[in-house]
Each structure stands twice: as structure tokens, then as C-alpha cells.
Image: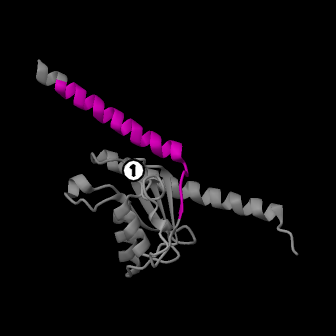
Amino acid sequence: MIEPDPHEAASQQAALASRDVTGMTLALEQARRAIEIGEIPVGAVVVDEQGRVLGVGHNRTIIDHDPTAHAEIVALREAAQHLENYRLPGLRLYVTLEPCVMCMGALMHARLTEVVFGAADPKTGACGSVLDISAYKQLNHHTQVRGGIMAQACGALLSEFFRHRRAQARAQREQLKR
């Protein structure tokens, strides 16, 4: 029996961690763009095995009047247009917030190899927080899912956004009372 080389395993882990930080950093940039246009700060990027970005997206549900314009869907659409194919095997999506049921369904339908998310979503998360769509054996495709990558940074961006939004709402209510 051949023993695995611990140095090789450590090297592979370091490469994976570096790739994940790069991908999630790009997704966070997209989330910040969402803030600039008044959207909930969720960002996503689709990358190939070499790390090339094929699609980017941030939430656009409010400005586009489109309930499907989540960051994941926007990035998925761009990648599919780029490759001229709705199937995207071998690709990975990085997203700052755990995908919802709609997004996970689309990501699995696209045959993505992996979905990597930052912060968990205890209200609508479909990668283990509320449901775990990828665990249903009856489905015809199974996308690998990993979460918690740069979770603190991703969660802090969302928390600060909602803290600011609540403060604005309080200020408006106080203004109306006068």
C-alpha cells in the first residue's frame, strides 16, 4: 500500500485555499457593486478550472423588477452566454451567501461541478441551513457544495448593509413624527 505524501496533501490544500480566497474576493467585489445600486449585497462569480472568470453577477432583483435576478442567476446567465451553452460542467461558482432553492436548482441544472459559498443563510439557505438540495439522491445531477469560505467577511457585509438600512428606516419614521 502506498502512503499519501503529507507534503503533497498540504500543498494541494494550500492551492485550494488560495483559489477559494481569490474566487470569494471577486464575489465580494460583486456584492459591493450591489450596495452601490441599492440592492442586497450578494455577489457571485463563475470560474473555470484555470480560475478564469466566465460570469459575474450581483443581486439585481429590485432594479430589474425581476424576482429571479439573484447574483447566482445573473452570473450563471453570463457564463452560459459566454460559452454558448446552458450546461456548464467543470465550472465552479463562488457566492457570498448560501444559495436559495431557486438558485441551487438552476446551478444543478447547469451541471456546475461545485458551488462555494461564504455566509450561511439560516432563513432560505438550500445548501444545508434550511434544506440541502444537493443531498437529494433522486435528482439526476449532484453539484458539490462547500460553505464557510470567508464567511466572516461575507456575513459582515450583509450585517452592515441591514444595520444601515434599519437606521435609515428609523430616521425616516422619526422625520414623519415631526
Quarter of the rendering occupied by the N terminus: bottom right
Judged left or right of residue 127, residue 49 is right
Q: Is residue 159 covered in magenta? A: yes
175, above or below 55, in the image: above
Q: How is the model colour-coded?
A: one colour
Quarter of the rendering occupied by the C terminus: top left
Residue at position x 46%, y 43% in the image: 155
Q: Is residue 22 covered in magenta? A: no
Could you tell me the amino acid type at mark 1?
Ala
Judged left or right of residue 69, residue 2 is right
Residue most toward the top? 178
Find disc 1 in the rendering and name its residue.
Answer: 31
Residue at position x 38%, y 51% in the image: 42
Spot occupied by residue 38 in the image (x, y as percentages of width and height): 27, 45
Callout 1: SS: helix
The range drawn in magenta is 145-173
